[in-house]
Structure formats: C-alpha cells, structure tokens
Image: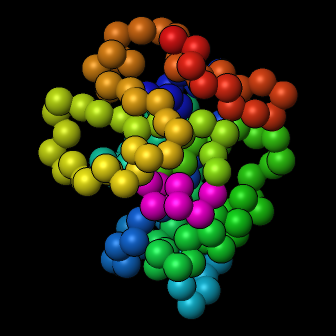
Amino acid sequence: MIIEKFRETVISAIKITPHFHEPTPGLLLLSEEAGYSVYRETDAGTDKDTSRMLRAGASGVFFAKVRDHDLAAAFRAIMKHIPEGRPVVCESPALRYYLEPGAFFIMNSDSAYNTKDISKLQVFPHVMLHLDDLARTDSAPVRFENGHWISGCL
C-alpha cells in the first residue's frame, strides 16, 4: 500500500526474511555471504511479496535471506545497490532492533492470515496503520522530502 501511494516517485523496496528456502525464479543473486544472500526481484508475475512490490510500482525490489545476527550487514549490502537519497520501504520487523528508520510503521489487517507477535516492537516509536483504512484513501501517512521520511501526514 505505501509503495502504491508513491508510484510516481522512484522508490525501492526490500523484503528480508529469516527463512532459508531455495530461491524462486525471478530472483537474481547479487551477493552471498555466510549469514545472508541478497537478490534482486525481476519477476512481477508471481504471488510472492517481492513480485507484488514490483507491481505496486517499486523501481527496484530486493530480497534477502538472513540469519538474525547478520541483518544489519545484509541491509548494508542491499543499500549498495540503491542510489543515495532514494526512498526505501523495507519489510523486516527484526531489522528495527538494529537500525533507526526514518519512519516505522506497524500494519494491521482484519484479513491477515499469518500474524506475528509484534508486542516487543511496539515499544519503539511507530505509527500504527490499518490496511483497510489505508486502502480507502489516496493520501499516504508519510511523505518523502529532502532525502527523509516524514510520518504523521494523514
């Protein structure tokens, strides 16, 4: 949803997971280290989260399989492929323990089938969003100005 709201902006998207499964077609390997593998998504035609990010309008989508203690290193490896100053949306709750984002959103949905315990993340400053509310508006709860995310715009 956030990516769709910035469709006219050159925005990059990142998906980070601790699950080490075989890469699917459309993932182009960019780098591989002992604790992580980083890919660029090239296939917008699947039901994967990264494909949906491409369809939503992201100009570049990156995927990483990462062990928790290597999260920050994997994120830095991905950022080498993203031009400085470009807005980035990253789906990785665990990364919040290692980095301070420009804006931290926790998304709720009545139709979520795979909910995770996020209670520990709620101690960090965040904006709670409901997917259905976001879908009903053309505006975004954030804007990107001068290389920084600014939250609280709705």
How does the figure colour the protein chain or chains? rainbow
Residue 151 falls within the magenta-colored stretch: no
Against 147, is 122 above or below? below
Residue 70 visible, this orientation: yes
**In the figure, is residue 147 to the left or right of 76?**
right
Residue 98 falls within the magenta-colored stretch: yes
**In the figure, is residue 102 to the left or right of 42?**
right
Against 11, is 96 above or below? below
The N terminus, quarter of image: top left
Q: Which quadrant holds residue 80?
A: bottom right
**In the figure, is residue 49 to the left or right of 43?**
left
Query: Which residue is at a point 41% across and 51% down the rendered structure image?
Result: 121
Residue farthest to the front, as pictured: 123
**In the figure, is residue 36 to the left or right of 73?**
left
Give coordinates of residue 99: x percent, y percent: 63, 57
Give coordinates of residue 5: x percent, y percent: 53, 21
Query: Which residue is at a point 56% across and 19% down the rendered structure image?
Result: 152
Residue stretch in magenta: 92-99
Residue 28 visible, this orientation: no
Give coordinates of residue 66: x percent, y percent: 48, 74
